[in-house]
Amino acid sequence: MQTLLKHINAYTPLNTKEIHLLKNAVQKKVYDRHEIIFTEGHVSNEIYFITKGCVRLFYNVDGNDKTAFFYTEGQFICAGESYTFNVPAIENYQAMEPTELFVFTKSRIEILLKESPKFEVLARIATENELITCQKVIASFVTKSAEERYIDLLNTQGELFQRVPQQHIASFLGVSPETLSRIKTRVHRKRHS
């Protein structure tokens, strides 16, 4: 709970009543490594906040899963289109390691929004988080090579290489595991020459 409160306080400080409302509105859920949190085809009515662990966002493409993003501590997760427009989601979320989430249901969020306008900030943060994530992923695929995407990932979220199986990182970068291996060797050689 402290992680969530700290994250919210960075944007808007909550008073005692609002903290109490928030504590009553969220439910803590724990997932094991590789456990599926949310699957495509369902309508999403939840927003998640990660307090511990790592979650992989992936899409099922012709029977193969394609990794789109990794979320870690302090990030909100939401199947945005499904949540907003009440349509079946096309994304899946999977815990990559033992993961702890706070879950906000749509009905609980509506109660929070009625009780205090500060919770509108919370809803906005979750939405902006998702939008920025999407824009960064799109921009990196449009403007950068696989090697540049690898270097970016190494520089910004290097810990993922210890937390996530290599085949998921390769999928996220849009390359095969073999190509990822070659990129790693090349980058390592450049950095140490």
Image: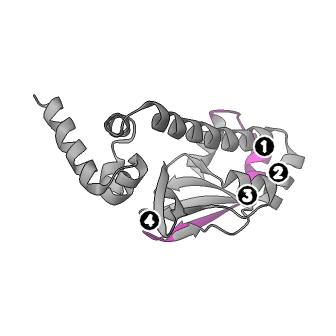
Q: CA distance from mark 2 to mark 3?
A: 21 Å
Q: Which residue is mark 3?
A: 82
Mark 2 or 3, which is nearer the eye?
3
Mark 1 or 3, which is nearer the eye?
3
**Residue type at numbered disc 4:** Pro
Q: Nearer the viewer, residue 158 or 145?
A: 145
**Mark number for residue 112?**
2
Q: CA distance from mark 1 to mark 3?
A: 21 Å
- 172 on left or right of 28: left
Q: Which residue is mark 1?
A: 119
Q: Position of residue 108 (x, y in %)?
A: 80, 59
Q: How is the image coloured?
A: one colour
| Residue sitting at the far front | 62
Q: Position of residue 115 (x, y in %)?
A: 88, 47
Q: Which residue is mark 4?
A: 98
Tell me whether the residue at label 2 lies in contact with that at label 1, contact meaning CB atoms closer than 8 angstroms: yes
Mark 3 or 4, which is nearer the eye?
3
**Residue type at numbered disc 2:** Leu
**Residue type at numbered disc 1:** Phe
Q: Nearer the viewer, residue 24 or 90?
A: 90
